[in-house]
Amino acid sequence: MIDFEFLLGDYTEIESWILNGRVDFGFVRLPTTAELETVFLEQDRLLVVIPHDHPLSNCEKFPINGLLTSPFMLLEKGAKTEISEIFERHQIAPHVNFTTWDDYAIMSMVENGLGISILPELILQRIPHKIIAKELELPAFRNIGVAMREQKSLSLASKKFLEYLSYRNRE
């Protein structure tokens, strides 16, 4: 007799929902704001996605400078993401000609040869799109965790759900 409500938001929205009590906990990128308690879940690789006919489709690992040779589709909404941080870390400025929060729109555009992108590996599992995913020559990751205000003050149902997540990650 427990109702679950799932909300989809970007990292800053989720953090805000947790802090103002709208949700009990949320899946976020780590590290997050210091006011929240977190539990690390897993590390997710960030992969370059390219169309099948891309000139670098046969390379083993995608060169960082290869991000400069095609139009870039940026997965971002509001706050800066891991992908923008890759650009800053390597001091590159790809030609971003499309920004969206819809990963499936990006995959479709890449499949149709409109550009390239970087997406999390978890998003790329079991996709229907005909695209190629390549690891960057300098691998990039995002750390995913669960954030909450105080773990000890969570409802019994929320605590059980978090126990299940810990159990699932050990498998």
Image: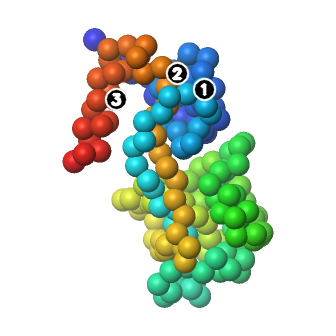
For marks 3 and 1, the one nearer the N-term is 1
Mark 2 vs mark 3, CA separation in Å: 14 Å
Return the mark for residue 106: none
Label 1 sits on residue: 35
Viewer-closest of 93 and 117? 93
Q: Quadrant of the N terminus?
A: top left
The amino acid type of the residue labelled 1 equals Glu
Label 3 sits on residue: 162
Residue 116: where, in percent of width, then height? 62, 71
- Is residue 9 something one can see in this rendering? yes
Mark 3 vs mark 1, CA separation in Å: 19 Å
Query: CB atoms at circles 2 and 1 under 8 Å apart?
Result: yes
Q: Is residue 120 left or right of residue 157?
A: right
For marks 2 and 1, the one nearer the N-term is 1
Give the residue at x 49% y 49%.
143
For marks 2 and 3, the one nearer the N-term is 2
Give the residue at x 72% y 42%.
78
